[in-house]
Image (cartoon, helix red, strand yellow):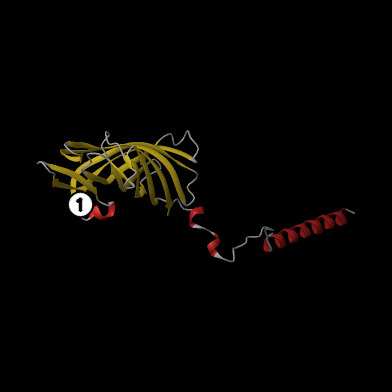
Amino acid sequence: MKRLEACLVMLGLFSLASLTARAQEYPRRDSSYVFTPSSPDLLQKTNYQPLHNAWGLDLLLSNNGFGAGGFYRREFSDVLSGFVQLAISDVKDDSEVEYYDPYTGQSIVPNKKNRLLLIPLIFGVQYRLFKDEIVDNFRPYVSVGVGPSMIFVAPYANYFSVPVPGGGTFTYTEQIDFFKSLKYGQAKYTLGGYIGAGTYFGLDKGTLSGVSLRYYFIPYRSGIESLEHIPMKKFGGFFISLNFGSLY
C-alpha cells in the first residue's frame, strides 16, 4: 500500500509539473484590443500639442471714434508672451464740435484745419495674472509696449477769400472729401507706447477672443493743429479694444 501511495504522489507531482511547464510555454494573452483610427487626421494637433502663436484683429473704441488694427502674439512661457500690434484711429481735439448744415447736407466742424490719423506700431509683452487661481477660460493679463508712431495730417477744407463792395474781403471754406484729402496729406513721426490690462475668454482650442483697456501716450513736441491756432502735443488716450484671433 505504501508503494501504491508513493506512486500516486509521484504521478500527481509529475502531472503538476507538466501543466506548469505547458502554461509557461504558452503564456496567457491579454483580452484587450487596441484600435487604430482609419484616418490619422482624426488626431488633431490641438488635442496633444500646445499652440504658442496667435494672430488676429483689434477693434478700437475711444472718445475720438472707432479704429482697427491687427496683432501677432508669441507665447514664451505659461505666463509671459510677446506681441506686435499695428492700429489706425482718428484723432480729434477735445474742443471740436460738429454741426450739420441743412443747406449743403454736410457736417461741419468750425475752425477745423486738419484731419489727423494716428498709426502706432507697438512692440511689447503680456504677463498673465493668477494662472493657478483662476480657471483657464478666463485669463486676465497686463501688458506694456513701445514703438514708432505715425501721425498722418490731411487738410480738412479749402479756404477762399473774395472781395466785397466797399472794401475788405470775405473768407469762406469748402470742405474736402475725406479720401480726396488723403492725397494732400503728410506724415509726422514720433515715439509712443501704451500700458493696458485685459482678459481672454474661452479655452485655447484654436480661437482667441478677449477685451482690453489701453492707455496710449504719444507725445509730439512741436504740436499739430487739428483746430486753427490750437496745436495738439499729446495724442492717444484711453481705448477699449475687442480682440478676435486664431491660434496655431
The quadrant holding residue 226 is: top left
Residue identifier under label 1:
185
| The C terminus: image quadrant | bottom left
Q: Along the horizontal axis of the image, is 37 left or right of 198? A: right
In the figure, 147 relative to 21: above or below?
A: above
Q: Could you say which quadrant of the image residue 32 lies in?
A: bottom right
Residue type at mark 1? Answer: Gly
Q: Where is residue 214 in the image (x, y as percent from the top left)?
A: 34, 37
Residue drawn at 49 percent across, 54 percent down:
46
Q: What element carries label 1?
A: loop
Please tell me whether residue 171 is drawn above or below residue 38 in the rendered image: above
Residue beneath the point at 70% across and 61% down: 21
179 relative to 37, above or below: above
Task: Please tell me which residue lies in front, 25 or 128.
Answer: 128
* Quadrant including the N terminus: bottom right
Front one among 220 and 153: 153
Residue 151 visible in the displayed image = no
Image coordinates for residue 44, horizontal then vertical, percent: 51, 58
Question: Could one spot residue 24 in this view of the protein?
Answer: yes
Is 28 on the left or on the right of 53, as rendered?
right
Name the residue furthest right: 1
Q: At 84% from the left edge and 57% from the top edge, which residue is drawn?
A: 8
Q: Nearer the viewer, residue 242 or 67?
A: 67
Residue 106 location, x and y as percent? Answer: 32, 46
Residue reaching furthest to the front: 166
From the top left corner, tell me how far across and down residue 212 is, in percent: 39, 39
Q: How crowded is mark 1: few (under 14 residues within 10 Å), some or many (20 or more)?
A: some
